[in-house]
Image (tube, helix red, strand yellow):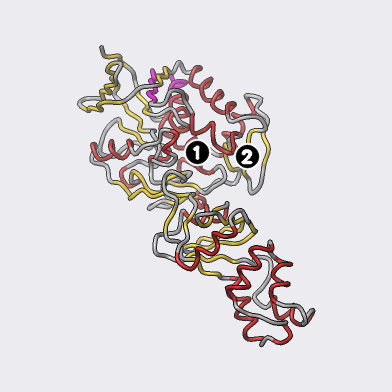
Amino acid sequence: MEHGFDAIVLGAGAAGLMCAARAGQRGRRVLVLERASAPGKKILISGGGRCNFTNIGAGPANYLSANPHFAKSALARYTAQDFLELVESYGIAWHEKTLGQLFCDGSAKQIVALLLEECAKGGVEIRCGEEIARVEQDDGFTITTQTGSYRAPALVIATGGPSIPKMGATGFAYDLARQFGLKLVEPRPALVPLTLGGEEVLFRDISGVSAPVAVSANEASFAEAALFTHRGLSGPAILQASSYWRPGEPLFVDFLPQRDAAWLLDAKRANPRAGLRAHLRDAFPARLADILTDKLALEGELGNLPDKALRAAGERLKRWEFRPNGTEGFAKAEVTVGGISTAELSSKTMAAKRIPGLYTIGEAVDVTGWLGGYNFQWAWASGVAAGDAL
């Protein structure tokens, strides 16, 4: 049996629920189909269970895309302040952690409850546990699942990317894009730990050690903590840079973001009898200091070491080159870079230019935010853009 709706949204994640709520409250009859057993599963695990629901400074510069201008329209029309006002209207207590990152004081469940209530206000029907067997297009769209067929003149792809497959994430959005002839920008893991091999395996020996650094990849630089792991590199600064890093390329770590390259010359004058290891142990956790000292291979008191060698060591510490041999993949990636090409979509409505009634929002689109609430803001903004156009 077929059921008639004005719009069908595939995916009950952040973008899909936001879109459905917005369209429902505009009087549209909306159905949301979700493969998982409950809505908002990725939301629930985000931010350590407290949901980093937006970033107060979110703007186009915080996003990667083959077209860096594409996100401007949606982000300008639905801002972080707009979502914060919605959060506050539900009495949800929140706090700013660092760098504009906003979290619930309580639980991510509050954000899911907010979205479900917004959907309820719009009379949105949400059906979970729906495995989609077929998506067909004629004068509208027919979605066939194990429970029946559903028809609507509009279809919204909000099934996300393949990051965090243990939460049920798949590349289904890309399968649909291929079916409809939409171009894809090659998807790859983003906000993901990097792995080390070769001589750099030594750094795995200090698994669990973290330090404040500045990490650079392809002209993008992030000053936050880096964490050494049993497989390589992680921590906020590394995750941020991973979105810009490409296999085969170097990654540069500034171990002394608060000091200049001449630091060791100053140390030599102030305390010439101390060795390099002692000075680095003042600056870094001992295990990291030891491995850096061994790699720099400068033994003896600083007073006996040439200025040229100390300056070179300081410069290396300011721009330490790593050559990651890969990432930990989609299993550990928080999001996906790439996806459905923005060239196929209207930046104002998220509608496919060549296929009437088809929309794509959220992580499925080639727009990827930094770590820190930016991807949620894109979900809200792109969801609103489509919801207002349905």
Whole-percent x, y for residue 148 in the image: 28, 16
Of residue 326 and residue 44, the one placed in the foreground of this image is 326
Identify which residue is drawn at 38% across, 46% down.
366
Instruction: Using the numbered discs, state the Cα–Cα distance from disc 1 to disc 2 in whole angstroms.
Output: 20 Å
Of residue 294 and residue 48, the one placed in the foreground of this image is 294
Q: Residue furthest left?
A: 138
Residue 272, labelled with which disc? none
Q: Secondary structure at mark 2?
A: strand
Q: Do the numbered discs 1 and 2 sit on residues whose CB atoms are within 8 Å?
A: no
Q: Give the total of numbered labels.
A: 2
Whole-percent x, y for residue 304 in the image: 71, 87
Q: Is residue 96 above or below residue 65?
A: above
Q: Quadrant of the N terminus?
A: top left
- The reply, left or right, for residue 270 in relation to residue 382 is right
Q: Is residue 370 magenta?
A: no
Quarter-wise, where is residue 254 in the image? bottom right
Q: Earlier in the sequence, mark 1 or mark 2?
A: 1
Identify which residue is drawn at 62% across, 56% down.
224
What residue sits right under mark 2 in the picture?
102
What residue sits right under mark 1 in the picture?
77
Q: Which residues are magenta?
A: 23-34
- The reply, left or right, for residue 157 in relation to residue 240 is left
Q: Amino acid at mark 2?
A: Leu
